[in-house]
Amino acid sequence: MIGLAVIGAIFIITSVTQMLTLSNYDWYVQVFGQQYLPPTLIAIRYVGSCLQRILGLAAGFGLIARYRWAAQIISIISARSIITAYWKNPYAAVKNMFVLGDRVHGYGRIIAGFGWHHFEITVLAWPTVVVLTIFNVLFFGWVFWYCNKPKIKTLLR
């Protein structure tokens, strides 16, 4: 089925891009900073994120090859992502991402170029959290459902 290949490709692409982001531990600490989590929990969360990306990458290739173990790993990742949807993108971290993005990329200057000189970029944090949470639940819910359909299970070896 083409759906397995698409899901596999999505997991491969997102795992690689997120691994590149995770390669900068200092950025990760700044985003989840002391105001949100203590250093020990940041380190544990970081290691868990790295392991999930490695598993997602392996499972993505395995799903393209139609292996049952890959569908099971992707189902576990999907269930975990649904259960922890809000904690994946907490408000404080999303707000920090906007602040850091503004410093690095000058989002505020870009928005001011459209005539919004008094616009505060961090206002977008709550709507972003809501959209990301809804997206995570819907996308990973669909992936979990798809990988566990009886018809799909018969295609796996």
Image (cartoon, rainbow, N blue to C red):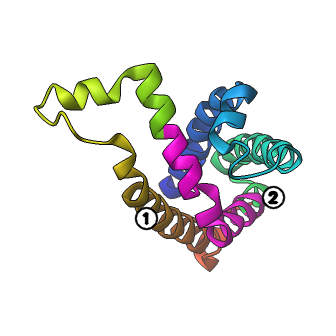
Distance of mark 2 from mark 1, alpha carbons? 32 Å
Q: Are marks 2 and 1 in contact (CB under 8 Å)?
A: no
- Magenta region: which residues? 72-97
| Front residue (pair 65, 125) | 125
Q: Is residue 39 left or right of residue 17?
A: right
Q: Amino acid at mark 1?
A: Val
Residue that numbered label 2 is attached to? 69
Query: Where is 58 relative to 86, above or below?
Result: above
Report if residue 84 is visible in the image.
yes
Secondary structure type for disc 2: helix
Which dot marks residue 34?
none
Residue 117, quarter of picture? top left
Q: Amino acid at mark 2?
A: Trp
Q: Main secondary structure of the magenta part?
A: helix
**Position of residue 55 measured from the top left corner of the image (x, y, whole percent):** 78, 46
Residue furthest to the bottom: 150
| Front residue (pair 107, 79) | 107
